[in-house]
Image (cartoon, rainbow, N blue to C red):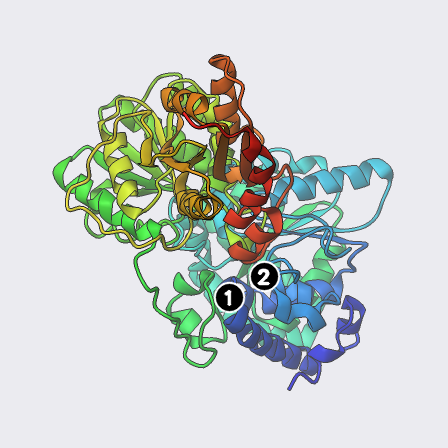
């Protein structure tokens, strides 16, 4: 089965293999990726595309002495298999198992943790400069996909890269992020890759490498460089930044990659190697459906088939509702930062193609772009994951909220994001948005309320944010026509006199369960769907603080600065003293795992809340 892979206990074992054995190792790795990720889910397409690149990197360079920095690092599965984690690979993204991204605490070979795009070049440059200052000689290698170059941080790093003595950037060009790459940078790379001179060089490459080894690799790199320069004018874009450009080369030709890396390893200057790869290579379903197989749950390893969702996800309800709003309002536009599939805007795109904008992996630009459209009377809905919107904080404050522009931030993955772990948990957006003037912040208890909140945002003449969870909701019946909510008004689902439970978003269902547990103990519990993290319904909070002996707040968010903190502030402002039990995530980064397991571990369950409430029940009063 895995004749060679099972023998790889460290990168040193990769270096012992001959070329035929390395090719066989690549086949075994692809098979292992498909079989294991089919069970655990994960980023199968990106990893199938970097098998040969990663093998060649470990064959030529020496981690952990040399440092590999993977942009996003969702394509680090092969790296994990080659660095002593093969025996645990079937635990990837599972509770207590390997993380789906690079994690410094997981292995000494993971030199830099990541989970968001555009970070590799800056981090690698920082390592290289620190090495130079310390008089070190280790090599720094950054592997970044072409989509990472649509991110402004990458170009901010390129602006400074000439300051280092040695740094290798590998541009892994597969023309995809999650969806097809867009914009001028994508067109630029495509122009290079389709140059007839490169195609001719590619056809000759294998024979030359076999005959001449490293000298042929260097020759091909120089010739391809000259050909590429001839396409775009006097100097390559990267050379203008102080890097020597080599390529493009076949990112699946192991002999060529190894010889090219040997040559580039000797260069004491910053260089970039442009490697063309195929996302999903070796697995037909992933090649045919590259968007779907970027990252997904479990699937059939033979056919690639996945189980259909039992109902529409929050993302799908969002996209279908936005389509309805756009049908009746020609000023509604949709903006995504390279996530049409994850945000479900691929459902909106065919219905309103001229009002759909994918700006690439550039969240800061997405928000500023939306702000500009809003000044002209358009109503942009920015669909960006909660954890990715963090990157555009300044633009939200300075360019949207300060000017009171009507931009709607639709924050997918608001709350725990389960298997993807701490880089993707959307647990901070209430805290980082609540202190900004002029903005309203909403969190629906179900899919139908999400529709109503979108209508509310459409009618609100100012900035607003809506957070909603990953995956499916409770399955509420959707109204044909959404109804705008009264801003800052909570919904009392159940009245009570002993204890009042204020819950936000998907925690409303847990609040209802807690009320039933309290009822079984003879306590009358009110359940309030807060709806708004900002503005908070302070009148409702004050009313129940006077009426009940205990308040409980429940949120799928960190406690620090979150919804519970807003309730405490309201009580302080009203000079009301009442015990408050806050249920939410602690002041730490939460690991990956199943949502229900993590909630149980950290006390975000009705049963755990009941235990914390009981000591206060003696203070309960009857009005």
Image x and y of residue 604, in percent: 54, 46
Residue 423: which numbered mark, if any?
A: none
Res. 527 image quadrant: top left
**Nearest the camera: 273 or 526?**
526
Image x and y of residue 392, in percent: 47, 31
The answer to which of marks 2 and 1 sits earlier in the sequence is 1
Placement of the N terminus among the 4 image quadrants: bottom right
Placement of the C terminus among the 4 image quadrants: top left
Is residue 318 depicted above or below 155 in this figure?
below
Residue 93: which numbered mark, if any?
A: 2
Q: Residue at x 59, y 40 (%)?
A: 612
Image position of 396 (left or right of 40): left
Kind of element beneath mark 2: loop
**Nearest the camera: 592 or 276?**
592
Name the residue beneath numbered marker 1. 41
Q: Residue at x 69, y 61 (%)?
A: 261
Image position of 49 (left or right of 15): left
Kind of element beneath mark 1: loop
């Amino acid at each position: 089965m895995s004749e060679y892979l099972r023998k790889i206990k460290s990168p040193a074992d990769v270096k012992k293999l001959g070329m035929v054995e390395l090719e066989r190792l690549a086949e075994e790795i692809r098979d292992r990726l498909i079989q294991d990720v089919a069970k655990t889910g994960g980023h199968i397409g990106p990893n199938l595309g970097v098998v040969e690149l990663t093998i060649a990197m470990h064959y030529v360079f020496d981690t952990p002495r040399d440092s590999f920095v993977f942009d996003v690092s969702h394509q680090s599965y092969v790296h994990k298999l080659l660095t002593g984690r093969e025996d645990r690979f079937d635990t990837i993204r599972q509770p207590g198992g390997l993380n789906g991204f690079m994690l410094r605490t997981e292995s000494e070979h993971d030199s830099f943790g990541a989970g968001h795009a555009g970070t590799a070049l800056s981090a690698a440059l920082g390592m290289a400069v620190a090495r130079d200052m310390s008089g070190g000689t280790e090599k720094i290698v950054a592997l970044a996909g072409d989509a990472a170059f649509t991110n402004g941080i990458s170009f901010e790093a390129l602006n400074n890269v000439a300051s280092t003595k040695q740094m290798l950037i590998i541009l892994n060009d597969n023309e995809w992020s999650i969806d097809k790459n867009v914009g001028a940078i994508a067109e630029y790379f495509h122009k290079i890759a389709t140059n007839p001179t490169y195609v001719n060089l590619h056809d000759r490459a294998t024979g030359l490498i076999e005959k001449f080894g490293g000298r042929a690799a260097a020759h091909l790199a120089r010739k391809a460089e000259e050909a590429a320069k001839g396409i775009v004018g006097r100097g390559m874009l990267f050379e203008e930044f102080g890097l020597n450009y080599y390529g493009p080369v076949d990112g699946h030709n192991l002999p060529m990659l190894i010889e090219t890396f040997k040559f580039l390893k000797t260069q004491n200057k910053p260089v970039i190697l442009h490697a063309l790869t195929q996302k999903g290579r070796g697995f037909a379903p992933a090649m045919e459906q590259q968007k779907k197989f970027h990252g997904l749950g479990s699937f059939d390893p033979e056919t690639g088939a996945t189980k259909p969702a039992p109902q529409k996800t929050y993302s799908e309800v969002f996209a279908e509702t936005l389509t309805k709003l756009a049908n009746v309002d020609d000023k509604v536009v949709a903006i995504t930062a390279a996530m049409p599939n994850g945000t479900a805007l691929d459902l909106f795109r065919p219905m309103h193609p001229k009002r759909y904008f994918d700006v690439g992996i550039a969240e800061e630009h997405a928000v500023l772009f939306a702000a500009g459209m809003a000044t002209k009377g358009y109503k942009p809905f920015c669909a960006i994951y909660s954890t990715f919107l963090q990157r555009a904080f300044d633009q939200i404050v300075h360019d949207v909220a300060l000017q009171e522009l009507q931009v709607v931030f639709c924050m997918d993955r608001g709350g725990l994001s389960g298997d993807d772990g701490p880089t993707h948990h959307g647990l901070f957006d209430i805290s980082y948005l609540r202190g900004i003037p002029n903005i309203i912040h909403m969190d629906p208890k179900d899919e139908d309320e999400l529709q109503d909140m979108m209508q509310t945002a459409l009618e609100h003449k100012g900035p607003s944010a809506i957070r909603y969870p990953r995956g499916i909701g409770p399955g509420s019946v959707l109204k044909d026509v959404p109804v705008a909510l009264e801003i800052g008004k909570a919904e009392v689902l159940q009245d009570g006199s002993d204890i009042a439970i204020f819950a936000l978003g998907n925690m409303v269902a847990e609040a209802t369960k807690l009320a039933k547990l309290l009822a079984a103990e003879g306590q009358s519990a009110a359940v309030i769907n807060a709806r708004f993290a900002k503005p908070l319904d302070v009148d409702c909070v004050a009313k129940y603080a006077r009426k009940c002996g205990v308040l409980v707040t429940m949120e799928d968010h960190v406690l620090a600065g979150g919804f519970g903190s807003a309730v405490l502030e309201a009580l302080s402002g009203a000079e009301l003293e009442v015990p408050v039990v806050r249920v939410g995530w602690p002041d730490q980064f939460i690991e990956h795992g199943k949502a229900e397991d993590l909630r149980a571990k950290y006390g975000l369950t009705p049963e755990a809340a009941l235990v914390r409430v009981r000591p206060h029940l003696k203070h309960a009063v009857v009005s």
